[in-house]
């Protein structure tokens, strides 16, 4: 019975291609979410063997079958997939602001960066690393941005909670530098 349910999970994930939420997987195999998670863990263990070309990854509260990184070269030779997007310093800086502050508006990003961020945000949306998550309930109803599942895949993390936490001492140094810079500009 358990083997049958694991096989059903594998079939659903294979056919879906993208990630599938735990609740949908549970409904698909007619089990509760706790049992489904346990079965997914067993399926994941099966894929950890060195002779397997795929792995099971968790993205937030969804699951997906994915190629093991050590097999990307072979896959690319066949699929001829375009290269991963190149993240310039400007784009990476903007992405880090969105990742840590999400949901966030362009105005908030620009306030932190101190410069216009239209190009960087548009590039991140184009790359599929960032998407619109809604609108702020404020005058003009500005668009809110947040990270996507592609962001999680790109950086090899399961959730935004897995992002490294900034060092509090470094944050204080950055804050002091920023305040000094603002004071210098005000004196000019």
Image (cartoon, grey):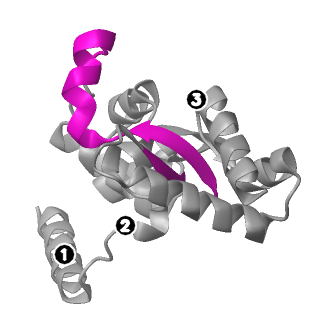
Report which residue position mark 3 lands on.
17
Please tell me whether mark 1 sits on a helix, a strand or a loop: helix
Q: Where in the figure is residue 14, as x and y percent of width and height?
A: 60, 32
| Residue nearest the observer in this picture, 61 or 96 | 61
Q: Give the mark count.
A: 3
* The disc label shown at residue 51, or none: none
Looking at marks 1 and 3 on the same chain, the residue that comes earlier in the sequence is marked by 3
The local crowd at label 3, few if under 14, some if 14 to 19, many if 20 or more residues have their Cα within 10 Å, is few
Q: Residue at x 31, y 15 (%)?
A: 81
| Residue nearest the observer in this picture, 42 or 109 | 42
Q: Residue at x 70, y 36 (%)?
A: 12
The local crowd at label 1, few if under 14, some if 14 to 19, many if 20 or more residues have their Cα within 10 Å, is few
Does residue 141 show up? Answer: no
Q: Where in the figure is residue 20, as x and y percent of width and height?
A: 67, 43
Residue 14 shown in magenta? no
Looking at marks 2 and 3 on the same chain, the residue that comes earlier in the sequence is marked by 3
Q: Where in the figure is residue 152, as x and y percent of width and height?
A: 43, 49
Write down the region rendered in magenta.
55-82
Report which residue position mark 1 lands on.
174
Distance between mark 1 and mark 3 Cα atoms: 42 Å
Distance between mark 2 and mark 3 Cα atoms: 25 Å
Looking at marks 2 and 1 on the same chain, the residue that comes earlier in the sequence is marked by 2
Residue 73 shown in magenta? yes
Relative side of 82 to 104, left or right:
left
Report which residue position mark 2 lands on.
163
Quarter of the figure that contains the N terminus = bottom right
Q: Please name which of the two marks, 2 or 3, marks the residue nearer to the observer.
A: 3
Q: Please name which of the two marks, 2 or 1, marks the residue nearer to the observer.
A: 2
Q: Residue at x 23, y 78 (%)?
A: 175
């Amino acid at each position: 019975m358990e083997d049958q349910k694991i096989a059903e999970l594998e079939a659903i994930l294979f056919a879906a291609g993208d990630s599938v939420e735990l609740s949908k997987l549970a409904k698909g195999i007619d089990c509760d979410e706790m049992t489904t998670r346990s079965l997914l863990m067993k399926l994941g263990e099966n894929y950890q063997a060195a002779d397997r070309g795929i792995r099971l990854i968790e993205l937030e509260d969804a699951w997906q079958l994915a190629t093991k990184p050590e097999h990307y070269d072979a896959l690319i030779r066949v699929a001829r997939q375009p290269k991963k997007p190149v993240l310039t310093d400007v784009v990476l800086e903007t992405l880090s602001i969105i990742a840590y502050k999400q949901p966030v508006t362009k105005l908030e990003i620009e306030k932190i960066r101190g410069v216009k961020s239209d190009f960087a945000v548009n590039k991140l949306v184009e790359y599929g690393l960032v998407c619109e998550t809604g609108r702020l309930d404020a005058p003009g109803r500005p668009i809110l941005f947040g990270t996507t599942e592609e962001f999680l895949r790109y950086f090899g993390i399961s959730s935004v909670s897995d992002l490294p936490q900034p060092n509090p001492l470094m944050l204080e140094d950055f804050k002091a530098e920023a305040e000094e810079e603002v004071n210098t500009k005000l004196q000019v």
